[in-house]
Amino acid sequence: MSTSEPIRLKGTSVGASRPTLIVTGSSGLIGSAVVEFFAHSGYSVIGVDNNMREVFFGDQGSTRSTQKLLEEVLPAFRHRELDIRDREAVDHLVAEASPVAIVHAAAQPSHDRAASIPFLDFEVNALGTLNLLEATRRHCPESPFVHMSTNKVYGDRPNFLPIKELETRWDFSGPIQGVGIDESMSIDQTKHSLFGASKASADLMVQEYGRYFGIPTVCLRGGCLTGSQHKGVELHGFLSYLVKANLEEKVYRIYGYGGKQVRDNIHAFDVAAFIKAFIDSPRVAEVYNIGGGFENTVSILEAFSLIESLSGKPMRYEYLDEARIGDHIVYYSNLDKMRSHYPEWSVTKSLEDVFEDLYSGAIAAT
């Protein structure tokens, strides 16, 4: 199969019944957005989640409330309490469900946390992905496999690009200013964090199952993915945690770079919409950088001002003159490849929309 042309999705003609989609990490931010999007698009969705986020981050990271909400409001959704590290259970589920597509959003998501749980991090991120890929190859090799990867597969290589310091942010200088990082950036010979390494292992395996076995796979290398369902904690969930810290008047810790480090932010709805576009017209062994693009970039200092304007509360923070290992100074995605392959897709949620959603969601949760 060629990687240059889309291929036709097979297996969706199932009579009067709904086609089945499997979503791992279904109670998390992206997983729950995908569940909702596809349930409203005529699919029967099986959600795989065992609330490992609570194991990683404690009670504040629990996603049980999201699971309960999905079960209450979506008749087309079924929850499966399953650990993706369990090879036999994963294989049995995929064989039983015969899904028309699999969206793999389950992960240990924190590069800080990974250093203290290296075996668990690798088993969830790398081994869990391999279990799903092999079950796909055995039972439904024509079904698209969507993998939520991460921009951390590039390690700290973006920090060696030319940058400039402005009043409230860092930014790229030269040709990529305002354009961003594309998929040609190398993932080799750079410091990743253990999380970045485990996710890079999964990313490469997803590509290989596409190239070697012809399975329609895609790696979505996301940066800051966000939305009101994000259970943000200090070690993961930049904007979600920042908004909660402001509303709860907690002290927010800035780690290095003057608080001017920059990220592009994309709402979970727009991620789910792209996943639907890919599943409708899948390709083999594709890789995309997915984010909000330059228009949705914000620094920590700028984010403080935005949430203060919504809440009316001053941001309480302390500055630590020590950057997190492998942290990016500036990162935003070049979306040209995604847009050229899927011109019907676009980022529909502006940065202001994102902040308003996070703010209203945090207010509703209090």
Image (cartoon, helix red, strand yellow):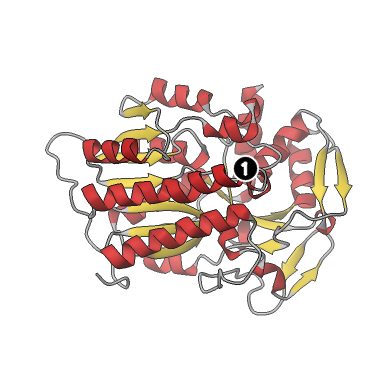
- Asked whether, in this view, residue 55 is left or right of residue 132, the answer is right
Question: Horizontal and vertical percent for residue 343?
Answer: 39, 63
**Which residue in the structure is indicated by mark 1?**
117
- Residue occupying the far front of the picture: 119
Q: Can residue 49 be seen in this view?
A: yes
Please state which of residues 38 and 196 is positioned toward the viewer in this rendering.
196
Category of crowding for the residue at label 1, using alpha-carbon neighbours closer than 10 angstroms: few (below 14), some (14–19), many (at least 20): some
- Asked whether, in this view, residue 364 is left or right of residue 270, the answer is right
- Residue occupying the far bottom of the picture: 175
Which residue corresponds to the image point at 63% horizontal and 75% vertical from the top-left? Answer: 176
Q: In this view, does 267 lie above or below 190?
A: above
Question: Horizontal and vertical percent for residue 284?
Answer: 31, 64
In which image quadrant can residue 74 be found?
top left
Q: Identity of the amino acid at label 1? A: Ile
Which residue corresponds to the image point at 75% horizontal and 53% vertical from the top-left? Answer: 324
Please state which of residues 240 and 25 is positioned toward the viewer in this rendering.
25
Q: In this view, does 180 lie above or below 25?
A: below
Secondary structure found at label 1: loop
- Asked whether, in this view, residue 174 is left or right of residue 304, the answer is left
Question: Horizontal and vertical percent for residue 17?
Answer: 17, 34
